[in-house]
Image: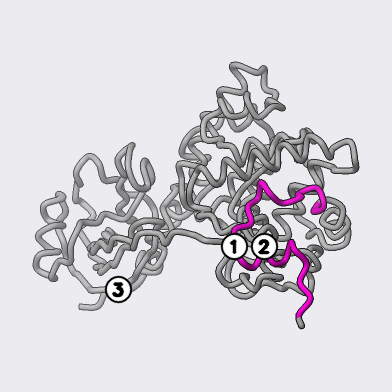
Amino acid sequence: MVDLRFRDIVRFSCGCNMVADFELKKLVKPLQDWFDGHARVLPWRDDPKAYKVWISEIMLQQTRVEAVKPYFARFMEALPDVEALAACPEDRYLKLWEGLGYYNRVRNLHAAAEQIMEQYGGTIPDTVEELLRLKGIGSYTAGAIASIAYNRPVPAVDGNVLRVISRVCADDSDIMKQSVRSAMERSLQAMMETEVTNGLIPRKFNQALMELGAMVCVPNGAPHCPECPWYGFCEARLQDKIDTIPVKTRAKARRIEERTVFVIRDGEHVALRKRPAKGLLAGLYELPNVSGILEQQEALEYVKNQGFSPIRIQALAPARHIFSHVEWHMHAYVVLVEETTVPKENILFTEAQKAVENYAVPSAFSAYWNAIKMEIKE
């Protein structure tokens, strides 16, 4: 006969564990002990001042840690504090961000830096309430800054934390719902405020949660359960629900857009165009492009209509770029035009090398940078 405790009978019969019903305080010590021996060495952890924590957390949104490292170093060297960021011209901070994508993040950083200079005398606030007043800072980022930089006992609930807490509690609520995130934040908040007097270190606990989700209870593929400090009491493992928790509503399919891209050159120069101030890739420079796939003759007509005098045209290989909600399927042409051409006002000619060095051009067009200097065949 199988010996089941009453708690196990209830657990397996109803399968309805919730975060609010779980004894969260037992997570603290094993997690913090594990973090002491497994924390990665990251540049923003060396000196967790509020500015570094803020910049790193914004960069890490939708971007891998290894990809962020060189951008973080470059950004810190160029703009080492709030004052420098607030005073930075748009073209420069966009260029520093080039390659990270989601450019509204850096625009919000700049706007928030101006707020901090004007409203807080250049000092980043240390409470969640005041941090939430800053442009581009939501509950997760506010919690991360307050806890990591100022050691405030507040949660920082991102995708990693939603996953690991849902699994350890076997909570099958849909983590895509704001109500679920809010409920988890409340439960963690209550526990942290109580346990901060019993050995919980907010900056360590929150970073350890993030690290566990990144390194052990991973987002893609099977979690490394034997390496987990919660192995003995993880309810998802005990209930054999690792493959079904967390529950996450499937995102809508990306919209496909077909575009024709133009690498327009006159000798050593290439044409760039500034995108509108609002919308996708707002305010960035791009290679001229249009919606739809143009045949070669149609492409030549487009170039002429932009005020150019084309000499030769050559098709380039198709390319694809994925944004969060849209996917571009691009066909392209490199077009040599007469040097005496005067283009329309919204297009500028710049030296090819300066185009790469001085202007923030989205990585969506990176597949065509080699065409700037390629030889166009007759």
Q: Which mark is residue 14?
A: 1
Q: Residue 158 at what x, y percent from top left? A: 60, 49
* Drawn side of residue 292 relative to residue 244, left or right: left
Task: Please say if 375 is above or below 120.
Answer: below
User: Within 10 Å of the Cα at label 3, are there few (<14), some (14-19), or many (20+) other Cα atoms?
Assistant: some
Task: Please say if 293 is above or below 136.
Answer: below
For the residues labelled 1 and 3, the Cα–Cα distance comes to 53 Å
* Drawn side of residue 242 relative to residue 224, left or right: left
Coloring scheme used: one colour
Q: Tell me the quadrant of the picture where the N terminus can be found.
A: bottom right
Q: Tell me the magenta residue range.
A: 2-27
Please, what is the three-letter code of the amino acid marked with disc 3?
Pro
Q: Residue 10 carries which label?
A: 2
Q: Is residue 264 magenta?
A: no
* Drawn side of residue 270 relative to residue 154, left or right: left
Q: Residue 261 at what x, y percent from top left? A: 26, 62
Q: Residue 282 at what x, y percent from top left? A: 36, 42
Q: Which of 347 and 118 is in front in this view?
A: 118
Residue annotated with mark 3: 318
